[in-house]
Image (spheres, grey):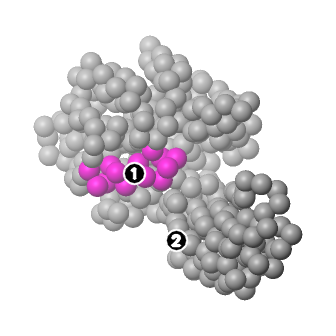
């Protein structure tokens, strides 16, 4: 019997934020070691894990990757961690696949590396794994993500999910404080921040490009209601289906913020809080995944590639290590009401399907 549900139920009950996945990481590493895999913990001094199955026969080095972190939510006024992006499912699937591949002696040439990565939601976990050398000898890597109901149902999978680039920019806008009865003696940071939001909303890139920008956080409080506030902080979320337009968009947003607040006598310091690259997927890796999906689900279960405005830090792997052939697929799970929703749910029966697809991928490369 597959242990995927046993692993899932345990991990689901211990959600932990990025780089704080201590119990999660310990459980996964312990399970891998009990199964007989060679395990390296604390990759790059983080909670990251690399496990390995070495056939002892020359051949390629293939990696499977799962992310481990949960999301932070404020629910009923209480800050908490909750698995609302399915990373507990991802880890359960890859952990189970690794255990079963070793037990079956399925790796007959080369080496299989299993990466359990922290902090995907922070956009920093993949970079930490790369900097820790986890991919230095890897030639091909596969990752996956549970897909929402509207994209993919149980019994279906897509061989390629084409994620967008994402950047999160924060502007700290400085004005000059004054009494609200004498506003002419100050520079209202709130007014300047509103001006900046409107200026960014007026940006245009080519209509032929797939992109968006929108303000997602606005913080301004002088502490009293009869003073002109001298500081405001605004965060913008930027998306682009391709990497090159993202660089143009970041420059335009920064200029729009700084010039618009300067018109009122304020200043703005703009910093990048987080960014993830757009998908860079290799045809050879996608072909392996496509064949594996067809084997497990039949031709009727194989969908076309899916394009999404979402982002995924997995794509730092091929960006930072261009020699690595990356494939990233999507598993139908009847997931509702949506990713990152506090009440996200999906059909747990899909997890065993995910493990079987990964096992088929590995056997095609290393079997």
Q: Nearer the viewer, residue 82 or 102?
A: 82
The residue that disc 2 covers is 243
The residue tagged 1 is 126
Residue 96, placed above or below residue 179: above
List x then y, in percent, for residue 297.
Answer: 56, 35
Please check the rendered image and state whether residue 129 is part of the magenta-colored stretch, yes or no: yes
Q: Quadrant of residue 175?
A: bottom right
Residue 29 placement: quadrant: top left
Residues shaded magenta: 119-132
Q: Earlier in the sequence, mark 2 or mark 1?
A: 1
Pointers 2 and 1 in contact (C-beta within 8 Å): no
Q: Which x, y percent locates residue 362?
A: 35, 40
As rendered, which of 64 and 20 lies closer to the eye? 20
Name the residue at 83% across, 67% down. 180
Label 1 packing within 10 angstroms: few (<14), some (14-19), many (20+): many
**Is residue 156 in view from this perspective?**
no
């Amino acid at each position: 019997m597959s242990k995927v549900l046993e692993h899932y139920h345990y991990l689901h009950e211990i959600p932990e934020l990025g780089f704080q996945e201590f119990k999660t990481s310990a459980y996964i590493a312990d399970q891998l070691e009990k199964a007989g895999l060679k395990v390296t913990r604390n990759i790059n001094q983080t909670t990251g894990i690399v496990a390995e199955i070495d056939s002892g026969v020359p051949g390629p080095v293939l990696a499977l990757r799962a992310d481990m972190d949960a999301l932070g939510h404020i629910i009923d006024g209480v800050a908490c961690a909750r698995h609302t992006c399915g990373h507990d499912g991802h880890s359960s699937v890859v952990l189970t696949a690794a255990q079963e591949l070793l037990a079956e002696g399925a790796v007959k040439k080369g080496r299989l590396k299993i990466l359990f990565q922290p902090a995907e939601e922070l956009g920093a976990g993949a970079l930490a794994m790369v900097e820790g050398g986890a991919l230095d000898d890897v030639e091909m890597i596969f990752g996956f993500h549970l897909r929402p109901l509207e994209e993919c149902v149980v019994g279906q999978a897509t061989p390629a999910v084409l994620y967008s680039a994402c950047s999160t920019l924060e502007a700290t806008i400085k004005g000059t404080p004054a009494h609200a009865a004498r506003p002419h003696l100050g520079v209202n940071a709130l007014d300047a921040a509103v001006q900046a939001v409107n200026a960014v909303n007026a940006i245009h890139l080519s209509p032929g490009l797939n992109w968006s920008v929108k303000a997602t956080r606005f913080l301004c409080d002088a502490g009293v209601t009869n003073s002109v506030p001298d500081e405001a902080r605004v965060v913008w979320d930027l998306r682009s289906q391709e990497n090159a337009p993202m660089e143009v968009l970041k420059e335009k947003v920064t200029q729009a913020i700084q010039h618009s607040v300067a018109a009122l006598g304020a200043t703005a310091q703009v910093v990048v809080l987080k960014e993830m690259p757009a998908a860079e997927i290799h045809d050879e890796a996608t072909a392996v995944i496509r064949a594996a999906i067809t084997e497990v689900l039949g031709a009727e279960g194989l969908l076309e590639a899916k394009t999404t405005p979402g982002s995924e830090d997995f794509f730092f792997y091929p960006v930072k290590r261009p020699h690595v052939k990356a494939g990233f697929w999507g598993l139908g799970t009847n997931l509702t009401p949506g990713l990152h929703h506090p009440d996200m749910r999906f059909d747990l029966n899909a997890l065993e399907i995910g493990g079987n697809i990964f096992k088929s991928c590995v056997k095609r490369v290393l079997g």
